[in-house]
């Protein structure tokens, strides 16, 4: 399916070439090539790239035409000018505009014999037209990323719960799926969604200056989910060493189910008694008494409960959380985001 960004790019190319031809700039089609660089995923990036590219184009055009008029446009001189342009851009850490600057320098010196002193003028105006048109077209309808961000947030949260469901099913079957490669593949899939979500959240944050954004900003929640994935990994690795025939396995099954329920209720904005939940995420040490062997068998479960507890804490006590929870009260937890559940 063709995205709206592709359509905007095509429109920008057509308008840029049309304007360049009206102004009798040579080669006119180069303005269309430049306009592609201006249609970025966010308006902020479009403006930033436009300013950077225009400055680089002006420098490269002036340097190129100066050398061409004074010394000629020999191949070795073009190569030396490109070397200087690249070295300066690398030094200034402006590699995003490096390629464009080199192309401008080559085109300026390459057309100097035909256009004489106006070669630099043509090249700079072509960049100015292409970047301006591309940016203006991109601003006509701002890139919309909220919907994608919302879907990725919902999928990430649901996939985290799915991982807990898998662990609960394994415990009920008195077996644990090996971490490598099966569970690791599942975890990597969740990480992929989270990374995509962080990228989309960054684009949303970049364009906040254009106006008020509706709803809460969940960008930090992707980072929270990233940490929660690590806690799931710790939980799985702890259970790889556990005796699944142990009586503690039954308690852990209930504890995992409870955490899943708390997460579901939190997302839906329902109430939960958090202090009681956290108290249940502990092994039954008293049942072991002073038996060191029994305590040793219980140690993997202790690690599992610790990972499960940290997982829940990340979700309900994360800094900058969009909901507030008190672990000693029966509290209302507003939804993280008004998202549609992905089943």
Image (spheres, helix red, strand yellow):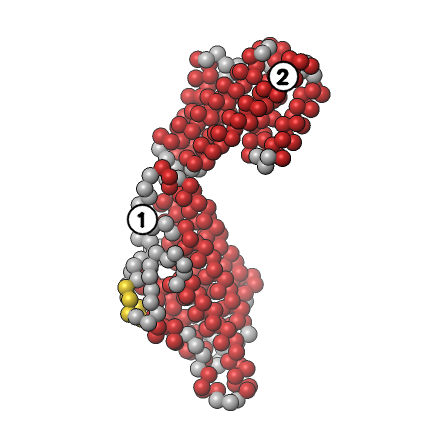
What residue lies at 44% left-to-right and 32% top-to-bottom? 47
Using the image as rendered, state which of residue 213 and residue 311 is in the foreground.
Answer: 213
Kindly state the secondary structure of the residue where label 1 is placed: loop
Residue depth check, mark 1 versus mark 2: number of the one nearer the observer: 2
Q: Quadrant of the C terminus?
A: bottom left
In the rendered image of this protein, does residue 10 appear above or below residue 71? Answer: below
User: Can residue 155 be seen in this snapshot?
Assistant: no
Q: Is residue 222 left or right of residue 214?
A: right
Residue 304 percent location from the top left of the image: 48, 72
Q: Residue furthest bottom?
A: 290
Instruction: Look at the picture and state if 1 lies above or below 109.
Output: below
Q: Residues within 10 Å of mark 2 (few under 14, many from 20)?
A: some
Q: Where does residue 274 sit, x and y in percent of width and height?
A: 34, 70
**Can residue 199 be spotted in the picture?**
yes
Residue drawn at x 59%, y 31% is 98
Q: Quadrant of the N terminus?
A: top left
- Residue 215, which numbered label? 1
Q: Earlier in the sequence, mark 1 or mark 2?
A: 2
Q: Residue at x 48, y 89 (%)?
A: 289
What whole-number distance in Å separates the C-alpha atoms at marks 1 and 2? 54 Å
> What label does residue 66 carry, if any?
2
Please rate how many residues cluster around mark 1, counting C-alpha atoms within 10 Å: few if below 14, some from 14 to 19, many from 20: few
Query: Depth check: 275 or 40 in front?
Result: 275
Above or below residue 148? Residue 48 is: above
User: Residue 67: which quarter of the image?
Assistant: top right
């Amino acid at each position: 399916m063709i995205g709206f960004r592709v359509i905007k790019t095509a429109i920008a190319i057509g308008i840029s070439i049309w304007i360049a031809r009206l102004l009798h700039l040579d080669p006119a089609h180069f303005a269309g090539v430049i306009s592609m660089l201006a249609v970025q995923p966010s308006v902020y990036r479009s403006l930033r790239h436009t300013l950077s590219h225009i400055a680089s184009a002006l420098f490269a055009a002036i340097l190129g035409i100066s050398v061409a008029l004074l010394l000629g446009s020999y191949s070795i001189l073009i190569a030396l000018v490109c070397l200087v342009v690249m070295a300066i851009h690398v030094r200034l850490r402006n590699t995003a505009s490096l390629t464009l600057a080199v192309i401008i320098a080559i085109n300026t010196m390459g057309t100097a014999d035909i256009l004489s002193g106006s070669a630099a003028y043509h090249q700079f105006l072509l960049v100015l037209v292409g970047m301006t048109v591309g940016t203006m077209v991109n601003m006509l309808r701002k890139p919309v990323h909220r919907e994608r961000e919302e879907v990725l947030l919902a999928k990430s949260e649901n996939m985290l719960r799915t991982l807990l469901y898998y662990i609960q099913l394994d415990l009920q079957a008195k077996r644990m799926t090996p971490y490598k490669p099966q569970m690791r593949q599942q975890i990597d899939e969740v990480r992929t969604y989270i990374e995509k979500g962080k990228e989309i959240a960054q684009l949303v944050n970049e364009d906040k200056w254009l106006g008020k954004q509706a709803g809460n900003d969940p960008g930090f929640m992707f980072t929270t989910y990233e940490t929660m994935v690590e806690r799931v990994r710790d939980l799985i690795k702890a259970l790889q060493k556990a005796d699944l025939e142990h009586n503690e396995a039954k308690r852990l099954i209930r504890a995992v189910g409870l955490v899943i329920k708390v997460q579901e209720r939190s997302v839906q904005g329902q109430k939960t008694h958090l202090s009681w939940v956290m108290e249940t995420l502990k092994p039954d040490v008293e049942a072991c008494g002073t038996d060191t062997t029994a305590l040793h068998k219980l140690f993997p479960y202790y690690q599992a409960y610790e990972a499960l507890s940290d997982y829940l804490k990340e979700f309900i006590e994360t800094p900058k959380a969009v909901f507030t929870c008190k672990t000693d009260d029966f509290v209302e937890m507003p939804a993280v985001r008004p998202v549609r559940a992905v089943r």
